[in-house]
Amino acid sequence: MRLVKVGSETVSPDKSEYPVRAEVRVRFADTDAQGVVYNGTFFTYLEVGRVEFFRQMGFLKNRQFISTDFDPYVVENACRYKKPAFFDDVLDIYVKINSAGRSSVVFHYVIYSRERDELIAAAYTVLVFVDPTTKQPRTIPEDIKKHLLEAIPFESG
């Protein structure tokens, strides 16, 4: 499988490299006048995948992030569209964290049509963890960074 260039990132289309999968069924409201999924809708699909990643990794409890010490902010998104998706398609969103910095993580995603097993899109998101009061970047604690990078579910106390 050929790597997909998406903005400044190179995203692997290999589903087996992604520890988390989420699904969405394309609603009629997700499509545009040409009958395909509107390009902006894909960013909502990325959020579905990202939230599922955090849920499966144990970072969401009672519909909230487990820490009140930081908030994750999306600061960059890019998506490369490969094939169209249509009303009522079931799309599988595969998600992983590709890298982590001092206060940021880079998510990679690939979106596949389940019934056609075709790569629909590849994307990435940069998320920065910020202090909820000052809105300034905050260092990601090493234990949390390890769990995110290794996709190990986090057990909070």
Image (tube, grey):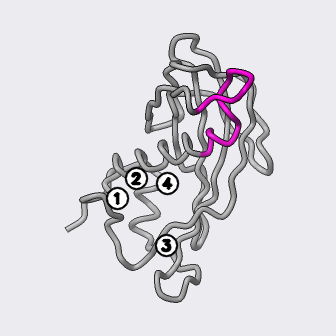
**Residue type pointed to by label 3:** Ile
Residue 59's disc number: 1
Point out the frontmost of discs 1 and 4: 1
Where, by quadrant of the figure, is residue 147 drawn? bottom left
Report the front residue among 33 and 62. 33
Whole-number angstrom distance, CA of label 4 to CA of label 3: 12 Å
Residue 35 falls left or right of residue 152:
right
**Residue type pointed to by label 4:** Leu
Mark sitting earlier along the chain (1/2): 2
Point out the frontmost of discs 4 and 2: 2
Mark sitting earlier along the chain (1/3): 1
Mark sitting earlier along the chain (4/3): 3
The local secondary structure at tag 2 comes to helix
Report the residue at 49% width, 48% height from top: 50
Q: Position of residue 51 (x, y in %)?
A: 43, 50
Residue beneath disc 3: 140
Q: Is residue 53 magenta?
A: no
Q: Are marks 4 and 2 in contact (CB under 8 Å)?
A: no
User: What is the magenta range?
Assistant: 30-43
Report the front residue among 65 and 26. 26
Report the residue at 71% width, 41% height from top: 79
**Residue type pointed to by label 2:** Phe
Q: Main secondary structure of the magenta part?
A: loop
Residue beneath disc 4: 149
Residue beneath disc 2: 54
Q: Are marks 1 and 2 in contact (CB under 8 Å)?
A: yes
Mark sitting earlier along the chain (1/4): 1
